[in-house]
Amino acid sequence: MEKQQITAELNQVMLRQPELQLKQPLNWTIRQGEHWAVAGTNGAGKTRIAEILQGRYLLESGSCHYYFDGLVSEQIQSISFKDIYSLADCRNSYYQQRWHATETDDSPTVASLLDYAFLDDELKEQFGQLQIEESLAKKLIFLSSGELRKFL
């Protein structure tokens, strides 16, 4: 079997800032066509790893290599809860808004944001595998943390 082309590679990465330091050097190889999901408890460093991949930190040691043309931000992306506001015109939304029923009328549904009726069958099948269909009728503001992560 032919080895896939490497897209990004982290070798023995340690951060410069002591308050952001990793417990051990970070090594990671991402190959062309791979999509990664980093899971862990709060404070485990998931966002930090994504930000290292995106080149947001100065390194104390180690190296990050990228084997693609264009900007890192176009090729390596992370998703967080703050990204909910980029999905729809939710500039006036706030975290506790879901508990104020009259203030959620303008919040779009998941299906309307996806334009679900026009998606191809393969993508709809993937949504089924992730159990996103259950959230299609919900307004974006009413998604639980887990549902929002799946959707994003």
Image (cartoon, rainbow, N blue to C red):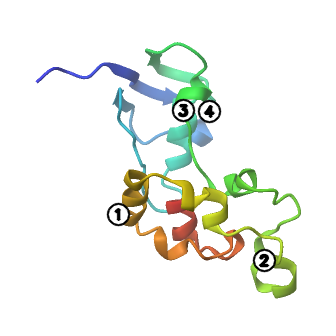
Q: Nearer the viewer, residue 52 or 140?
A: 140
For the residue labelled by badge 4, is the local secondary structure a helix, a strand or a loop? Answer: loop
For the residue labelled by badge 2, is the local secondary structure a helix, a strand or a loop? Answer: helix
Q: Which residue is mark 3?
A: 52
Image quadrant containing the C terminus:
bottom right
Crowding at mark 2 (Cα within 10 Å: few <14, some 14-19, many 20+): few
Q: Which residue is mark 2?
A: 96
Mark sitting earlier along the chain (1/3): 3
Mark sitting earlier along the chain (1/4): 4
User: Which residue is at a point 55% across and 55% down the rendered structure image?
Assistant: 118
In the rendering, at what x and y percent does residue 37 appear? 42, 49
Amino acid residing under circle 2: Gln
Q: Which residue is mark 4?
A: 17
Question: Left or right: 100 with respect to 86?
Answer: right
For the residue labelled by badge 3, is the local secondary structure a helix, a strand or a loop? Answer: helix
Of discs 1 and 3, which sits in the foreground?
A: 1
Instruction: For marks 1 and 3, give the CA distance.
Output: 30 Å
For the residue labelled by badge 1, is the local secondary structure a helix, a strand or a loop? Answer: helix
In the rendering, at what x and y percent does residue 102 appear? 87, 85
Instruction: For marks 1 and 4, give the CA distance.
Output: 40 Å
Q: Which residue is mark 1?
A: 129
Quick check: marks 1 and 4 in contact, CB under 8 Å?
no
